[in-house]
Image (tube, coloured by chain):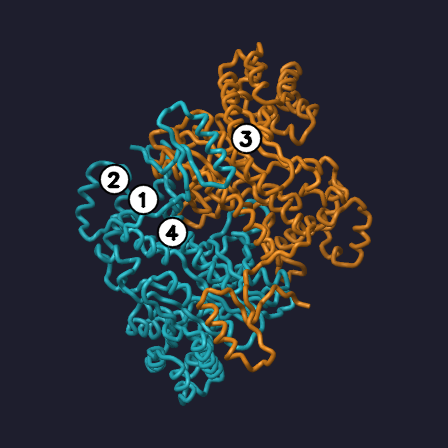
Chain colours: A orange, B cyan
Amino acid sequence: MDMLGMFCVRACSGLVAIRTASHVRFLHSFPGITVAQIDEEVAKLLELKARLGGDDGKHQFVLKTAKGTRDYNPKQMAIREKVFNTITSCFKRHGAETIDTPVFELKETLTGKYGEDSKLIYDLKDQGGELLSLRYDLTVPFARYLAMNKITNIKRYHIAKVYRRDNPAMTRGRYREFYQCDFDIAGQYDAMIPDAECLKIVHEILSELDLGDFCIKVNDRRILDGMFAVCGVPDDKFRSICSTVDKLDKMAWEDVKKEMVNEKGLSEEVADQIGEYVSMKGGMDLAERLLQDQKMSQSKDACAGLSDIKLLFSYLQLFQVTDKVVFDLSLARGLDYYTGIIYEALLTQAGVAAVSKEAQSGAPSEESVSVGSVAGGGRYDGLVGMFDPKGRKVPCVGVSIGIERIFSIMEQKAEASAVKIRTTEVQVMVASAQKNLLEERLKLITELWNAGIKVCTFCARAHTHT
Amino acid sequence: MDMLGMFCVRACSGLVAIRTASHVRFLHSFPGITVAQIDEEVAKLLELKARLGGDDGKHQFVLKTAKGTRDYNPKQMAIREKVFNTITSCFKRHGAETIDTPVFELKETLTGKYGEDSKLIYDLKDQGGELLSLRYDLTVPFARYLAMNKITNIKRYHIAKVYRRDNPAMTRGRYREFYQCDFDIAGQYDAMIPDAECLKIVHEILSELDLGDFCIKVNDRRILDGMFAVCGVPDDKFRSICSTVDKLDKMAWEDVKKEMVNEKGLSEEVADQIGEYVSMKGGMDLAERLLQDQKMSQSKDACAGLSDIKLLFSYLQLFQVTDKVVFDLSLARGLDYYTGIIYEALLTQAGVAAVSKEAQSGAPSEESVSVGSVAGGGRYDGLVGMFDPKGRKVPCVGVSIGIERIFSIMEQKAEASAVKIRTTEVQVMVASAQKNLLEERLKLITELWNAGIKVCTFCARAHTHT
């Protein structure tokens, strides 16, 4: 990446040079660079060019979508529709209603809900009137909706785009504009039943989409907090240490430990104790064992969380989904608003990894194993209360399916299978051998249209300039 | 409105006062004010309050959606889905594919496409990186997509939200965030056939939605330009006079004429000549008559447009839609990019007017007649060329269905009909008389879910705080 960075800086400082043939030779001196990486670098350069106002002072129009965003062509739309239909059917099978909220919210609606991630929120320009921001997820708008309409009880889904000024990695399905498919249950119910239903939903959707093997990691914020407490982490460092633990899916324990000791100021001893706990994975048995654990059992928080994990697994057994669910003490989701159970689903089959192309062409090999999370969620019992004028709480639990990574995999599978994807539903094509039967053709086509038949006379297809 | 304005200013300058009981008496002194108007004023005040940072320095949270936007509750979503299904079915019947584009574009992509309306574009805050704007319509992103992918031939639909910083009038279905349902045909075809198909589509959709009687007005930019030329309007005033003519659906001719003479500097005589033409309405016969018109026939532009109108009507006859189409010389759509035929569909049945509530409660009576346009479009042969690096043109014609007004009407009809709208598709509810049969219930429900049955055990409904 250093070499790439240098390439970028050097090319930028000599925009004219890059337009000569010599830049081709220049590229050859970077044997490790992939096509995808070049595309991303080119996009960066063009962006810079646009900001510099083009070359020679003459305005050159940049024909591109905004950084981190993409168009969907008809083929991609056909695949997307298929994925949405599977997801929507599942949500409906579980009796959910659907709502929609605006793409932007008052800026203050989003303030203080995302912790460190708040810096990734897109703000709108102040053009007079209210200060607005693009929604960062669908959960906070949902909580705002519940409080605003005084709703205490609803099972709803919401499929819509959200916006994050993150560092995009589009070859890995990470965008700045992306869909979330959210299912949430708000209201007071028997403990852990709605939570178990969310996991059942993830299990159903990932099974039906046929994306290869997957695994759903489960943990609880109270177990994490209790663990930090009994290990001797000071209260004010819980969130910060939590976000370090969250990096365990991308970093080795040694590096995570270094961050805890060197950057976050924990003692080696405390870090090692955390390290012992976060290496634990299991099922109901692990929860039972930890309830007996001399240290862990000292924390009321941890015990409450562990009892709930036990109860959760008993329901997951009835729901027939325990085969994919793992109680994993290293799971620590970043968002501030979670209060109880948290979970994350990962695809474990390296073969269908969305990153495989990139991995084959020279990117670091650890990328090829981690397909990344495709769903995540948890319980957030305090969020609605933050919006209610009287602070009335509405317990909520939900899950968000991340469609872009799933979509990348589906798209690759479709390409590999060579099955032709239909982008229209045309049933009849009205044609004639002679050119001058136009009137007869139009009469016939009208009759067919009026009868509800899908038909075309001149069938337009996405033809490109030759 | 002056009284309302005063109310607003006075209330704002005394925010503390408005929170005392006296403001109720204060309101009674405005007998003409409607509930809808009060709602809008309250929203304005709350907005101002939010900007002032709340009262007494203490931060009071404002629980609302951004100005001019709305949530959709499950009932409204059910109606919206129904409308979308009707529209999508029609687009598919006509063999269209679908695409999607990002909600924001590079700012410069939108620059210079909308004439005077450009001031209504939402910009994103400059947070480093590219300068971005929210899309204003789906047509310009479509043209950008065609040029970027070098597509010269496609029939596509796109249903998505667009954004305009317009003065919202939500009771009349005018929002700042609203859906457009666009159908466009790009490519070189026999003259007027794609144009006629767009009108056929509007006819089909408005008939199927069963919104009462409607009328589709048709004109041609070249006829307007030719008319202005032969009436003696200077070339550089065409667009400006065009936008004055566009006001004829809201203003009487006398007032339009005044604007032409007093503000735009036309002579009385020129204005009167325009007035004579723009009062003409008819069908193919009118086009034939105007082709013989001594003045009109002097303009090559006008003649080309009139011949095309004739040809269009011949196809509309074959498509069996002439009953609703009127050649109306007063139709002049505002957008800059139209180059040929233009059209607009209006609901003519005053009874189902979306504004009827407002009209009954004291708003000016002319509002109650004009339900406003529910669809519009035209030919834009130059837009793609503005994006192509070599200026290659792709002829395009399209139509946009404005869903919010249609939706307002559908919602009112649903309320009036008292037919219960289902917001879930649940087929089975699993319940038990005793509380302790939970395990059996969950087993049964699992079996049903796994068999694809839509079922719930605790059926959450949108219950509100009591």
Q: Which residue is mark 3?
A: A320
Q: Are marks 3 and 1 in contact (CB under 8 Å)?
A: no
B93 lies above or below A326: below
Q: Nearer the viewer, mark 1 or mark 4?
A: 4
Disc 4 chain ID: B
**Residue B45 badge:** 1
**SS at badge 1:** helix
Which numbered disc flags the more N-terminal residue, 1 or 4?
A: 1
Which numbered disc flags the more N-terminal residue, 1 or 2?
A: 2
* Label 1 to label 2: alpha-carbon separation: 10 Å
* Label 4 to label 3: alpha-carbon separation: 36 Å
Q: Nearer the viewer, mark 3 or mark 1?
A: 3
B317 lies above or below A411: below
**Residue B18 badge:** 2
Q: Residues within 10 Å of mark 3 (few under 14, many from 20)?
A: some
Which numbered disc flags the more N-terminal residue, 4 or 2?
A: 2
Q: Residues within 10 Å of mark 4 (few under 14, many from 20)?
A: many
* Label 4 to label 2: alpha-carbon separation: 38 Å
Q: Which residue is mark 4?
A: B79
Disc 3 chain ID: A
**Residue A41 badge:** none
Q: Are marks 1 and 2 in contact (CB under 8 Å)?
A: yes
